[in-house]
Amino acid sequence: MSESPHSAIATRPRRATTGVLVGVLVAPDAASIAVPETFARWRRLTPLATWLPIELREASYAGILSGVAAALDRVGMIPRQLILLGEGSVARRMLELALRGELPCGGIVAIDVASDALTFHIVPTVTAIRLVVHRNDDAPQGSLIGALRAADLDARIIHVDLTAGRGTEAAAASATETFVLELVATIGRRTTDGAGDP
């Protein structure tokens, strides 16, 4: 019996993980989206992702950049492998840094961000932008949402209805979970096949 001609072809070794880091920005004196029950559930749903709370010394633009750089160094990953989660004013700053091209990453999930108009022009980015915002039907077209819709970006927005009362938090958590699962799968594929290098 002859040996198959294909047996001499080297195969690519399989990676142990997908190479995705989910960094949750935690600002001093701010409520964290990473409440233990939710955080544990998201970790279970994304077993191949590395989850890391990124404790910020300060919630400024410089504080976010240095905290993210330190986290990437600590786990030995590159920006395109990173998904960032943030809430409130930290999420707005994180989003602005990404839209200025100063914070390269695979994706961001920004929760409960202010929809005020941007004070700068959006630069092209391959970062996937996901927003969970409170519904504001009166938001002007020049607002953040209008600017994102007008730009050529991979951006998706879920509006949470404020009239839902206690259900608002559950709806926001569910929307965030949907975006996290989507981005972990997408960024995992991008890093495996080498596409989408920000």
Image: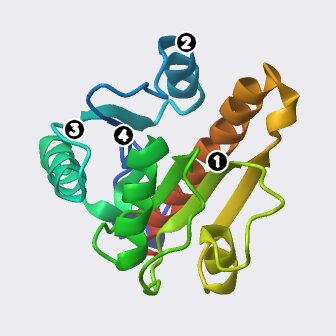
Q: Nearer the viewer, mark 1 or mark 3?
A: 3
- Give the percent coordinates (x, y) of residue 141: 73, 78
Viewer-closest of 107 and 8: 107
Position of the C terminus by quadrant: bottom left
Viewer-closest of 29 and 6: 29
Q: Residues within 10 Å of mark 2 (few under 14, many from 20)?
A: few
* Secondary structure state at the residue bearing disc 4: loop
| Alpha carbon separation for disc pair 3 and 4 | 29 Å
> What amino acid does circle 2 point to?
Glu
Q: Which mark is residue 179?
A: 1
Side of 144 relative to 27 (left or right): right
Earlier residue among tags 1 and 4: 4
Q: Residues within 10 Å of mark 1 (few under 14, many from 20)?
A: many
* Dots 1, 4 in contact, CB < 8 A: no
Q: Which mark is residue 16?
A: 4
Tell me which residue sits at (86%, 33%) in the image: 163
Above or below, comparing residue 168 to residue 99 in the picture: above
Q: Residues within 10 Å of mark 3 (few under 14, many from 20)?
A: some
Tell me which residue sits at (29%, 62%) in the image: 79
Q: Nearer the viewer, mark 3 or mark 4?
A: 3
| Alpha carbon separation for disc pair 1 and 3 | 23 Å
Earlier residue among tags 1 and 3: 3
- Give the percent coordinates (x, y) of residue 35: 49, 18
Q: Residues within 10 Å of mark 4 (few under 14, many from 20)?
A: few
* Secondary structure state at the residue bearing disc 3: loop
Q: Which mark is residue 138?
A: none
| Alpha carbon separation for disc pair 3 and 2 | 22 Å
* Secondary structure state at the residue bearing disc 2: helix
Q: Which mark is residue 37?
A: 2
Q: Which mark is residue 56?
A: 3
